[in-house]
Structures are given as C-alpha cells and as structure tokens.
Image (spheres, coloured by chain):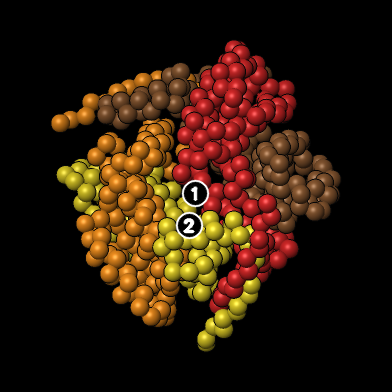
Chain colours: A brown, B orange, C yellow, D red
Amino acid sequence: MKDRVIRFGVSLPETLSERFDALIKQKQYPNRSEAIRDLIRKVLIEEEIQQDEEVLGVLHILYDHHQRELSDRLTDIQHDYHEHIISTTHVHLDHSNCLEVILLKGRAREIKQLGDRIIAIKGVKNGQLYLTSRGSNIK
Amino acid sequence: MKDRVIRFGVSLPETLSERFDALIKQKQYPNRSEAIRDLIRKVLIEEEIQQDEEVLGVLHILYDHHQRELSDRLTDIQHDYHEHIISTTHVHLDHSNCLEVILLKGRAREIKQLGDRIIAIKGVKNGQLYLTSRGSNIK
Amino acid sequence: MKDRVIRFGVSLPETLSERFDALIKQKQYPNRSEAIRDLIRKVLIEEEIQQDEEVLGVLHILYDHHQRELSDRLTDIQHDYHEHIISTTHVHLDHSNCLEVILLKGRAREIKQLGDRIIAIKGVKNGQLYLTSRGSNIK
Amino acid sequence: MKDRVIRFGVSLPETLSERFDALIKQKQYPNRSEAIRDLIRKVLIEEEIQQDEEVLGVLHILYDHHQRELSDRLTDIQHDYHEHIISTTHVHLDHSNCLEVILLKGRAREIKQLGDRIIAIKGVKNGQLYLTSRGSNIK
C-alpha cells in the first residue's frame, strides 16, 4: 500500500525563516521540508505515548556488576516480562560499571511500570526509560 | 520595519498529514501553517536558551508563609537582583500555601543561578524556572 | 493540625556524598536535609500531575499585541474558563512584544486543554504550560 | 579502593514521609535510602551533562529501511565518528520499520552534534538522544 504525498504551503515571516534556515543548516538537515516533517513526527509520537498506545521503550540502566544479586534480579524480572522485552545490549564501561540498554514493547503504561521496577533495584545507579513509536503510524 | 512573508511548500506522506490534521484540530489550531510556525518558534527559542542569549524567566515557587524568615529572605534576594526582576505575582492558595510567580530577564545562565538560589531557600516547598524568548527575534 | 517530623537515616557512599555536598553548596541549599526534601517534593508533585489531581497551572504566552483580534480572543477564552483562571500578569517587553502569565487551577487534564487552546491562537508566538501542586498535600 | 559509607539523618514532615513511602512502594524500591540515593544520583548526572564532561549517549532512531541510501549514510557517519560509537543494536519492527539504538561516548557537546547529524538524515522518522554518566563518578 503506497502512501500518497500531500504538498501544502507554509507562510513564515522572513526573519523567522532566516533563523530557521540557520538552525536547519547547523543541525545538517537536507532541506526545510525534512526538518518540518521531523517536528511533526515528534509531536505525533508524543501524542501516541500520551494516549497509552502500543509503543516502544528504550531503557538504559547504569550499574556496578559487583553488586551482589543484582544480575540475578535483573534476569528474573526480564524473564517475568519476557513478552515485553525485545533485546538487551550490555556494555562493559570500566572495571565495575556496566551500561545495559533494554528494548521494550507494549502499552505505554505497562512499559513504565516495568521500567520503574528495574530502575528501583538496589545497585542500579541510574536508569531512564524513553518511549517512542513503533513506527507503523508514523510515515 | 515590516517583515516580509516567505511562502514555501512542505511535502508530507498522506497518512502523516491526516494524523497531523487530527492533532491540529484537537489542539484547536486555525490551520496547518500556524501549527507549523509554533513548532518552528519553539525550537528557535530552545536554541536561544542553549546559546545563553538574553532571555526571560518564569519562576514559580510554592511556599508556606508561616515559615519564619522566608518572606524576608525572598525580599532580600529580590532586591539584590532587582535589575533582573520584572514583576512578582502572589496568590494565596489556602490558609498556609502561597504561589508566587516571579518574572525575570537576563542571560540564561544568570537567571538559572538566581532561580537556584530562590528555590533552595528553606520553606520553599517546590520551585521551577522556565526560560523563554524576549520575543524580539521570534516573529 | 500540626505535622509531626519524622527523622530517618540515609546511607551514601562517601564519593557520592562529597559530590552531592558540592552541588548543594553550588545551588546554595542550607543543608542536605533541605536539598533532599526538595527532591522528594518534586517527585511527589510529578505524581500528583500524572494522577490528574487538582493542580495549579502556570501558563506563559508571548505575543505581539499588534496582531488583530488576538486580545479579544484571549479575553473571550479567559471568560469562558473564568472558574479555572486565578490571575493574569502582563508585561510589555518592547514596542510589540508582550509576555502574559496566566495562573490556572483545576484537574491536570482540563488545564492542559485550556492551555492548548490559548497557545493555538493565531498571533501567540510561543506558549508553555507548567503544572504544579496546590501545596495542600506537599508539606 | 573501597568507598566508605556515610550515614546522615533527614527530617521530613510526617505527611510528606507517608506520601513518599507510598510512592516508593508503588515504584518498588526496597527502602527509602535506595530511593533517595537514586534521586541524588539523578541530579549529579544532570550536572555532569551540563558541565560538558565525558558522558555516554543513548541514541535511538526509527526509520524505514526501504528509504534509498539511508543505510549507506548511516554507515558512513558511524565510520566517521567510530571513536565515539560503542555499539549499535538493530531491531526489525515490521516489514518496513527499524529501531536502531546507537551507544555513544564523548563530551556532551560532541555527542549532541553527532546525534543531531544522524537524526537529520532524510528517512530517519524520529530520533532522540539521551545522555547519561559513564558511572565512574557515580557510586
């Protein structure tokens, strides 16, 4: 199913358009249309998340792998929620620190709960969950 | 000095444009052009703040006026920084709680410091500073 | 009704506590306890907003008063929602620009809708709504 | 080098402490101390990022792999900045959509520039960069 392209006009005061062009150049967008599409997709994705639709989650946690029982708890939780977990990437930052990025899918609210539970584990120094779209509604 | 209006075309996949139109309607924008101008102004303002330009600050603090010495400290600080303070609005929320909104002007960094200092006063239950543009560059 | 004070112990690795003390000093908090109370109140307020409780809104809008019909529309909307509007502060920034700060009360969701509607008015260059607590649950 | 543990007292009004305990339970923290350590680490990490220290970046991008030349451009950029890129995880979301999570290291400012450049590529539907600590200063 091909997606038709709609074209429409936008009017901008010249001073605003000049400043926008400078920003576009700095951020290295190929043209205004692409920069504006990015702004539009961003607000649509914020709306998907607000509406508790099926979304993706990018959860990163920072922890010390010397912390006893931490990896066991992490593994247990990830198995409890296996249908929500897409994949896990692990980076050895230094002798003690690890960064783990866990990709999640599900309703916004469920994913937030799972994120809270993982971030709350003793030994997780810092964690943050970010939600984004599954992309099927965002062309 | 009048500001010329620039008109240019934006192309969007139809599914994206339909969802954007639904959002515009929900947020009650008069048309696409106005919604897009709002998105553009928003990123330009974020950029002004990042660049430590002359900006405005909207600081709101929540406090209990029974707290001893609090109002004196608030007044002292506001006088120390009088050249940065535009105005203060005070609301009596209930028997003990007050909301105070302090409008500030100056470089982003200075205003942040002043905001930190006010929020840190004992008895200020919560405070948040938001920066925005002075408007002269944002048509 | 007096509020009893609860005292409890927090343990921190020394390196973390040193960095926290440096931050506290920079932000000019009188002591650790006050800084920690501020962090706690902040997450409780975020929770109130999430739960759609009765909250306060601080809406700031930037606009050009030369824009035809803008002030009429602003006044009309403010009258439609008069039970949600506490007060309005107006600042003349320069020959054309105004900053208006509108203080609102009501359920988080209602206030967001009202904020959206005002920000969407043609001629409002930028607007942002921030929600905070009414303070009655935040000691 | 072992890190000594510092213990200190925090006083809270009872109503605040009750609400904090409820939140802690909901977020499944094992105890108050761990919840407070998490709040402290979070502000310290925000400070590291503000100060342009050496940090980590978690960049996620959503794109349609049918988009011509996109993967080539992505690969080119990642090679240009190979010293900043730790790893890339790729997820096939559906017939057309991909989620890619790129882990980055470097000064906050450099990583932001690289993130901007990748997000601006035509065909990247949405992207977001989040910065966090390398953990060595955050016990």
Identified at 53% across, 73% down, the residue is C137
Question: Circles 1 and 2: CB distance less than 8 Å?
Answer: yes
Residue D73 image position (x, y, % from top left): 57, 15
Circles 1 and 2 on the same subunit: no
Q: Which of the 4 quarters of the picture holds residue C83? A: bottom left
Mark 2 secondary-structure assignment = helix
Residue C29 image position (x, y, % from top left): 44, 65
Along the line of sight, the residue nearer the viewer: D94 or A100:
A100
Q: Which of the 4 quarters of the picture holds residue C50? A: bottom right
Identified at 38% across, 31% down, the residue is B33
The mark tally for this picture is 2
Using the image, name the chain to which the residue with label 1 belongs. D
Identified at 57% across, 72% down, the residue is D10
Residue B17 image position (x, y, % from top left): 52, 28
Along the line of sight, the residue nearer the viewer: D4 or A134:
D4
| Residue D117, placed above or below residue D34 | above
Query: Dot 2, how many residues are within 10 Å of its Cα: few (below 14), some (14-19), or many (20+)?
Result: some
Along the line of sight, the residue nearer the viewer: C36 or C129:
C36
Q: Is residue D111 left or right of B54 when viewed as pictured?
A: right
Query: Dot 1, how many residues are within 10 Å of its Cα: few (below 14), some (14-19), or many (20+)?
Result: some
| Residue C27, placed above or below residue D59 | below
Q: Which residue is mark 1?
A: D47
Residue D49 image position (x, y, % from top left): 50, 43
Q: Amino acid at mark 1?
A: Glu
Identified at 52% across, 67% down, the residue is C32
Q: Which residue is mark 2?
A: C23
